[in-house]
Image (cartoon, helix red, strand yellow):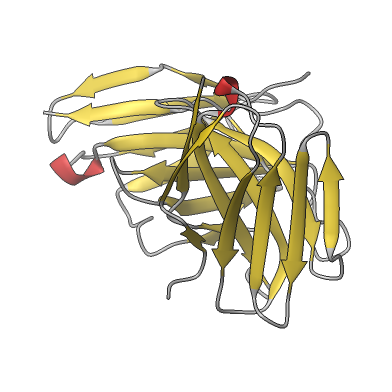
Amino acid sequence: EPEVTQTPSHQVTQMGQEVILRCVPISNHLYFYWYRQILGQKVEFLVSFYNNEISEKSEIFDDQFSVERPDGSNFTLKIRSTKLEDSAMYFCASSRSIGTQSNQPQHFGDGTRLSIL
Amino acid sequence: SQQGEEDPQALSIQEGENATMNCSYKTSINNLQWYRQNSGRGLVHLILIRSNEREKHSGRLRVTLDTSKKSSSLLITASRAADTASYFCATAVTGGGNKLTFGTGTQLKVEL
C-alpha cells in the first residue's frame, strides 16, 4: 500500500538554525499538509497546500515557516530560525481531494522528530 | 470541552475483550476520522465517517456518529495485544477546508 514517507526521522538542530523537513506524499494525491505534535500534546494543524500554493494555515504557521513543492514528488517544510519551542514531531499528510463531496482521508507519514538545542 | 475530546483518557483491558472509546466535538463537521498511533510512530488512518452517516464498520472496528449529540464512538471488538496504542478522533469542520482538528486521544492497553 502506498505510503507517505518523511525524512529524516530525527533532526537535531541548534537554536537559530534553519531546518528543512522533507516529505514524499502518496503519488496520486493532490493535497498536502503539515501537522505537529509537541510531546504530550495534541496533534496540531500547521498548513495545507494545493496546486502549488497554501490553501490554509494556522496561527502557528508564522513567517518563520514556509512550504514548498520543489519537484513532482517532494513536499518540504522549512523553519527559518528555529526556536526551542519548535521542538516537536512534525507529520506530513496527503489526501486525494478535499471538499464535502469527497471526504477523503488524510494519510500520514511516520513523522520527523525535531529537537532544538 | 474542546473540539475533539476523547473519553476515557486511558483504558486497560484484557485480550479478547471489547474496547470502546468516545469522542465529543463542538462544531458542525463534514467528517470525523479515527486514527491510531503507536508509541513514537505516525498516525494510521482507521475509518472516516461522513456527517450524513451514522455507522461504519471495518474489520473489527465499528464507528458510530451522532451529529445531534456531536459525538462519535470507536468500538474495537475481540481486542489483541497489538491493538495497544493511542487512538485519536479528528474532525474536519464545516467551512474549515480539510484541516483536521485532533482530540486528546485515548491510550488503550490490551493485556495478555
Residue A51 shows up from this direction = yes
Q: Position of residue B33 (x, y in %)?
A: 68, 52
Query: Is residue A58 positioned above or below A7 on the image?
Result: below
Q: From the viewer's perspective, tell me whether residue B98 is left or right of residue B102.
A: right
| Identity of the residue drawn at 75% across and 53% down | B63
| Residue located at (72% from left, 38% from top) | B77
Place of residue A86 in the rendered image (x, y in percent of width and height, measured from the top left): 24, 42
Residue B23 located left or right of residue B56: left
Residue B60: x %, y % from top left: 78, 35
The C terminus of chain A, quarter of image:
top left
Camera-side residue: A69 or B25? Answer: B25
Residue A9 image-quadrant placement: top left
Let me know if residue A55 appears in the view.
no
Q: Quadrant of residue A21?
A: top left
- Where B37 falls versus B1 (above or below)? above
Residue at 60 percent of width and 38 percent of height: A93
Q: What is the quadrant of the N terminus of chain A in the image?
A: top right
| B89 with respect to A98 (left or right) | left
A12 sits left or right of B24 in the view: left
Q: Position of residue A11 (x, y in %)?
A: 29, 20
